[in-house]
Amino acid sequence: MDLSTSLRLVAPEELMSFVSLVLLLACAWGGDRASRVISAAAAVTLLACAALVAPTLGSGVTGPDGAAFSGLFSADAFAAFAKILIYLGAAVAVVVAPAFFERLHAMRPEYPLLILLAALGGSIMVSASNLITLYIGLELNSLASYVLAAFLRNDERSAEAGLKYFVLGALASGILLFGMSLTYGFAGSTSFAGIRAAVDSGLSAGATFGAVFVLAGLAFKIAAVPFHMWTPDVYEGAPTPVTTFFATAPKVAAMALLMRVALEAFGTQAAVWREIVIFAALASIVWGAFGAIGQANLKRLMAYSSINNVGFILIGLACATPQGASAMLVYLAIYLVMVLAGFVGILMLRDGEGEQVEAIADISGLSRTRPGIAAALAMVMFSLAGIPPLFGFWGKFVVFQAAVQAGLVPLAAIGIAASVIGAFYYIKIVKVMYFDEPANRVTGRSDWVHSVLLTVTAVFISPFGYLLTKWLGALADTAAAALFHVV
């Protein structure tokens, strides 16, 4: 494949790289006054990149047709599906930020630039077909994320969140690098195709350890138990727009990368890593559910909800089938919108002085003071719990259906039973908003951008979302098929 073809396949990454460099100069020359303009440029760039990759998904590009730079990069339908979710999540994180930071006099042009660079790293991650490409994308995403977590320099919680994320992220990177080294040493190749060929006849003890360490390093990025310890503190301490980003784009990128590594590089040895994934799935579901019950902060509760939902998504990975992969992508798409709706709703919770309201006790009786926000948040909570007829139910349904089809009936049964535990703390939020006496804390006015986003996302997770099931399922099937083209 010639260079021009490879450059054409990486057009979204080229666009983001070029715009990032231009915006970096604009940051230096324009200063804080250019924040709004740079934010708009970053959001438009992300949406343009989503439009660039959409044809790849629509045409179902797979295999050699999407390979670039001698197999280092894979611009196939699977990557396109994940990239669209990443770009949309990042764009929303950019759009909701100015109203939040300007109240704190902390809006700086570096924020949208860092989001753009983190999205670029995530884009490279989901297209990685080589361990080297994987690590470059992962570190680009991580380094930008560390700075974003500590973006509010005068806020102790933000500084603490950035430090914790950096220290634990560095540990996870070391674990991942060690696993990559072992994998290369025993497989003799860093490409996923080469690893797959080397382990096709079986995993040696050394290669098994390599696979385990690689999966452990990636488990940190998706906040799966037992590598979840950073999530509640970082979600609570980071600025809310940053938390919105962490809960969406990087999580999609890490989950998609985990899928590509497990199903492409080690796909022929699913029996070896399936038990590890099943343990992580069940542990994440249970720990996320029980951990959320005693939380008094909305952002910490959403952190444990994130851990809980990662467990459900991993059930699809344990299937190691095209149906399981497709179910994971459907769940990721629905989950992305649910989380965006949840955090946009949290951003709209302000007191009379414009300060953020995060305590669960402070939204008591919200339905009588801000009925629109309360209704949207109630929909989010019921949808995250998987209660029909809201669209979140469909995500859980397709994952459990894939597990049953793969013969993992006990896993599906345990997952369904454990989801009942999670419903408790979601319903608790609805009870506080609708049945408790009003706390009269949420009295501030909402930004119109937040109102529009909350309305759009609420419609998506409402029963109207079921109108998209056939279309979303077809796209997910197309994307999942790209992971199994070698089978």
Image (spheres, grey):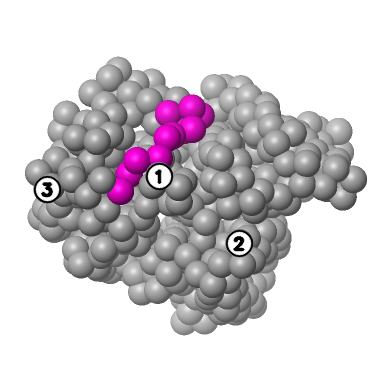
Tell which of 436 and 486 is nearer to you.
436
Magenta stretch? 441-451
Compare marks 1 and 2 and give the one earlier in the sequence: 2
Find numbered disc 2 in the image and state the secondary structure of the residue it sits on.
Answer: loop
**Residue found at x 90% / y 45%:** 29
What amino acid type should be assigned to the residue bearing mark 2?
Answer: Leu
Quadrant (top left/top right/bottom left/bottom right) for the N terminus? top right
In the current view of this chain or complex, which residue is farthest to the bottom?
Answer: 205
In this image, 109 relative to 402: left or right?
A: right
Q: Which residue is mark 2?
A: 152
**Residue found at x 54% / y 22%:** 58
Q: Nearer the viewer, mark 3 or mark 1?
A: 1
The numbered mark at residue 465 is none
Is residue 198 among the parts visible in the rendering? no
Compare marks 3 and 2 and give the one earlier in the sequence: 2
Residue 208: give x, y in percent of width and height.
Answer: 46, 75
In this image, 109 relative to 164: left or right?
A: right
In this image, 270 relative to 199: left or right?
A: left
Q: Which residue is mark 3?
A: 436
Cα separation between marks 1 and 2: 22 Å
User: Looking at the magenta stretch, what is its main secondary structure?
Assistant: loop
Is residue 283 among the parts visible in the rendering? yes
Q: Nearer the viewer, mark 1 or mark 2?
A: 1
Q: Is residue 450 a member of the stretch shown in magenta?
A: yes
